[in-house]
Image (cartoon, rainbow, N blue to C red):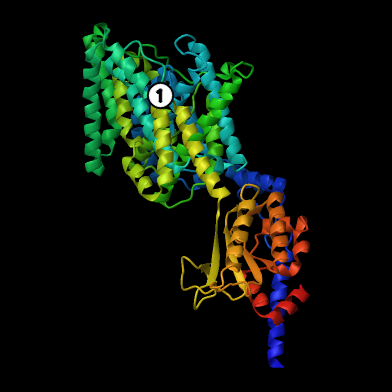
Amino acid sequence: MAQEQQLEVVNNGRTERTGWLLNSPDPPGFFHEIFSSIRRTILPHGTRNHSSLPKKSSASKAFSFLQGLFPILEWGRNYRATKFKRDLMAGLTLASLCIPQSIGYANLAKLDPQYGLYTSVVPPFIYAFMGSSREIAIGPVAVVSLLLSSLIQKVVDPAVDPVGYRRLVFTATFFTGTFQAVFGLFRLGFLVDFLSHATVVGFMGGAAIVIGLQQLKGLLGISHFTTKTDVISVLKAVFNSLHHQWYPLNFVLGCSFLIFILITRFIGRRNRKLFWLPAIAPLVSVILSTLFVYLTKADKHGINIVKHFKGGLNPSSVHELQFNSTHVAEAAKIGIICAVIALTEAIAVGRSFASVKGYHLDGNKEMVAMGFMNIIGSLTSCYVATGSFSRTAVNFTAGCETVVSNIVMATTVLVSLQLFTRLLYYTPLAILASIILSALPGLIDINEAYNIWKVDKLDFIVCVGAFLGVLFHSVEIGLLVAVVISFVKVIVGSIRPSTEVLGRVPGTSTFSNVIQYPMATKVPGLLIIRINSGSLCFANANSIRERILLRILRLLGDENEENSKDNIRVLVLDISNVMGIDTSAIIALEELHRELVSRGIELAFASPKWQVMSKLKLAKFVDKVGRGRFFLNVEDAIDVFFDPNMSASALHNC
């Protein structure tokens, strides 16, 4: 009698758990999730309703909204003078590196030098109010500068139509910011992840070599150069130029200061207290080389100089945005490519240093901040800005506490634009080339490429694809090759997901792969199969169905197997890994159910996820199979089907 009561209690508990599974509420709808995502991005506080907490006033809600949009309002209340001292020193150190680099990167982007400095003023100011990283340094970077010039000069030649080229740059920058802001507001950060780590490593390495080869124009004093970025075209242009007039003095001057910059960097790495030495070396190089050219009149003897340099505050560029142009589609395409590349670099840099400081960086907030700073930048004569790894490392080493260091840097650059731009008229182009060359070794990570090779050979193919595509064709082709290979890798994995037979690991209630754990025991009469796929859909459902049926047919024909023809009564599908399912997959499951029933085998499901269970109920699949065939976990399914008495009772109650 006591045993029967105990059995009834167990059955009732199991039935109750199955009821929880079958009667769970419907998951949130598609539009509800979108609006919730936007609210979590710009209103992080108060997104949940707590009945026990007092309701916030309208003023509190408004301030909470502003805090979510402008993080400076939150941490700024606790800002102290001691922090400002460190941010001031870090910002001044950062500016000494930023000024020459910005001029060089503007030259790389085929823009006048002042636009590089403009890009180091407005975007850092905007990011300081909206960004959440404490260490990241905002401004122009080499890779994005190359990307812009290589893409836009295919539409408008800067040598033929510099005004049209500049306008297209500003328009592309506006689209870049718009896409970045949309990615953040709608929490579409996964789009940035399409550029895998292996892709970024290969792309950066290839881009660094291309950028370095491009600097041969300034380093050798070559006046006529190719507009193409592939290594063959660049080397051919250099070889052809050497047969014409060129000025070796440019090469001597550039290499001399390149060696000086590299020596200071070596000293700074050996002695951490001298971190400021490699940071100010580029600015010292610009000052000394400019004085040398001015005093010796070297520009009259073949030294190429900057010449045109307009100072003053950032002029408005609203009137230069072209949305009615025939090139607006190209500008949008360039904008989305730059948006993804710039975000990938910035978020990678920000998260790296945030992990060192021990705080979390919200990628979606970063996207919104980057988006708005580039939108506003496009209206104030700036081109695409993002986080720079080299300058962020300097900012971090200089002891910055908050993004106030960006404000100090931007203010210093603004003062320089007002007072010192005339002095930069005689700056040699060879020095700008040497400054860019000195920053490139940090983009080539051979050790990481080797680690990728050791860990995942397919990832290494992606890395090499990006590297060779950038090196031998163009920047966009390199990205396209890497993304295509990555997608093929993902698609192949999705189309042919693995399935595994489970057994109970002795001494535990865990069910694991019997091949990985040979000691795991199969349950007599039951075949437990787990589907290892995050999505059960049109691409893989029939493949999985056929694989399961093939496995069952093999077992039915094998008399030596533990689960032989006389023993297999139930197939339990563990779908705990399946996060989503579509109508094609549901039809495939119906076909699997019919084929199993025709062979006298029952079908049961264990551990279905919320979204999956909801769709199975909406498609009436639960009623077709039977409500008693769905279980909260594998163990419940085994308890029901292992004992015929419990099976009949439990299935009747469900």
Q: Quadrant location of the N terminus?
A: bottom right
User: Residue placed farthest to the bottom in the image?
Assistant: 1
Foreground pick, 516 / 314: 516
Foreground pick, 283 / 73: 283
Q: Is residue 55 above or below residue 639?
A: above
Q: Is 297 positioned to the left or the right of 517 in the image? A: left
Q: Is residue 158 above or below residue 535?
A: above
Can you give x and y, in whole percent of width and height, for residue 215 in the image?
A: 33, 21
Can you give x and y, in whole percent of width and height, for residue 463 in the image?
A: 41, 39
Foreground pick, 638 / 618: 638
Quadrant of residue 85 within the rendered picture? top left
Quadrant of residue 606 within the rendered picture? bottom right
Residue 302 shows in the view: yes
Circle 1 sits on which residue?
415
Dot 1 alpha-carbon crowd within 10 angstroms: few under 14, some 14 to 19, many 20 or more: some
Q: Is 260 positioned to the left or the right of 621 in the image? A: left
